[in-house]
Structures are given as C-alpha cells and as structure tokens.
Amino acid sequence: MKKIFKFILNTIPRPLLIRMSIVVRPVLEFLLKGDRFTDPIDGKSFRMFLPYGYGTQRNNVLSPSTLSLERHRLLWLYLQNETDFFTAHKKVLHFAPEQEFYKRFKKQGNLDYTTTDLFSPLADVKADICNLPFEDNQYDIILCNHVLEHIPDDTKAMQELYRVLKPGGMGIFQIPQDLLRDVTFADDSITDEKERAKIFGQYDHVRVYGRDYFDKLRSIGFHVDEVDYTKTIATELVEKYCLAKGEIIPICYK
C-alpha cells in the first residue's frame, strides 16, 4: 500500500488529487472502519489510518474520512480548545484550503470566510501570496499552512501576510520543520524535482526550515508563540488521534 500511495502522490497533480479524493474517500472510510484510531475532526474511528509521504512514507497518518494528517488534527484541536474560532465572528483568510477544513469552515455562520491560492480548485480568489489583492489590515485570522516552503521569496510572502492581518489578529503558519536544524537551508540552484525531493523532502519544496523560522517571522513584525500543543494532550490521545508528538504550532500575532 505504501508504494501505491507514494506513486500516486508523486505522479498525479495536486488539483486532480483533490478532485479524485472526493470519490475515493467514502470507499476508504467504509473499508477501514474500526476502533484503534480516531479522527477528532469528525469523531470517526478506524482500524488503521493510511500511509502518507512524498518520499519516506509514514504509517497511520492519513485519516480515511477527512483525509487529515497529523498537523491538521493538531490544528483542529488547538482551534477548538484554545480559541473562539468556532463561536466568535471572525473574518478569515485561508490559503491553500485543506479539504478536511474547507466545507466545515464554509458552513460556520460565525465566519466571514475567504479562501485563496494560485492553483487550488477550492480557492475563492486566485492570488499570488507575494502580491495579494487585499487591502491592509483586513483579516482577524489568517491560516497559511504548509505553503511557505513552496515560495521562493518567503520574506515577501510573510510581509504580505503581516500587511493584510488586522492589528491584534492571529495568524497560524505551519510549515514542515526540522527542529534539530538551527538554520534554515535553501539553495535556489536546486531545480531538479528528484533532487528537491531528496534534499527538501518534496519535489516542489524550495527549503528546509530550521528553528530560526520563528525568528524570521518575528523580524517581519509578528509576535510569535511557539506552541508545543501535544504536551497538553494525554499520551493515549496523542496516539489515538495519530498526532506528531513535539510538533510546534507557530501562533503569530500582529
């Protein structure tokens, strides 16, 4: 199964994968019913989660029902337990909206919810993150997760995120991060997709972020809280929800 999923991820363009998953998801959900793992986003349980990874495949990480990964489930729990995201009126900008969140957030009556991306079929506004078509100080919350590692000029992208966030607003900008690495590694001369996958972890990534990612956000102007939310969750639930222990959520304020 690992080889099949790896081939699919590395062969089929992401926009097409999104469309295909709408059909495949109910089948996977039925076939994998069980009680070993639970997706906290929809409360459904399964005997196993699916493997995932463009390079090295991780076992039991992709939920059959929502197609969420570890980081999505962790973010959901944080928003649900630590914020008023689901109750207070918020103007939200969501980059590259994840399927597991898109319909749920769209249906929330408390949210003025806009999605944006250059390529995603789920985007309301087709836009370049480095040149956003939005006015200054527009959004209470910005979600921009696993996007910046794809952007050659991530400094400009961060500046745009800061510009459109309201004073007092909150941004969550998750990225794949090597917490054992002090300094981010980037090399613009690496353009071959196989080399990028080998060095950066995925064929369309342009850097590997280290712990200095948080300080870079601070240099843009954000106040950044480095939240290790799995520390607040019981060990048995970290395992039950298939979370990545020690993953840091960067909570950014303007």
Image: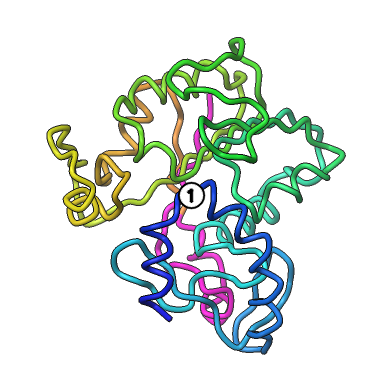
Q: Which residue is mark 1?
A: 14
x then y, percent, for residue 142: 59, 32
x then y, percent, for residue 140: 67, 27
Residue 246: say if magenta: yes
What number of labels is visible?
A: 1
Residue at 61% of width from left, 35% of height from top?
Answer: 94
Residue at 73% of width from left, 28% of height from top?
Answer: 91
Q: Is residue 82 above or below residue 159?
A: below
Frontmost residue, 157 versus 8? 8
Question: Residue placed farthest to the right in the image?
Answer: 109
Residue at 24% of width from left, 54% of height from top?
Answer: 197
Residues rendered magenta in the picture: 228-254
Residue at 38% of width from left, 65% of height from top?
Answer: 53
Q: Is residue 106 above or below residue 253?
A: below
Identify the image's colour scheme: rainbow, by chain, secondary structure or one colour.
rainbow
Frontmost residue, 88 versus 32? 32
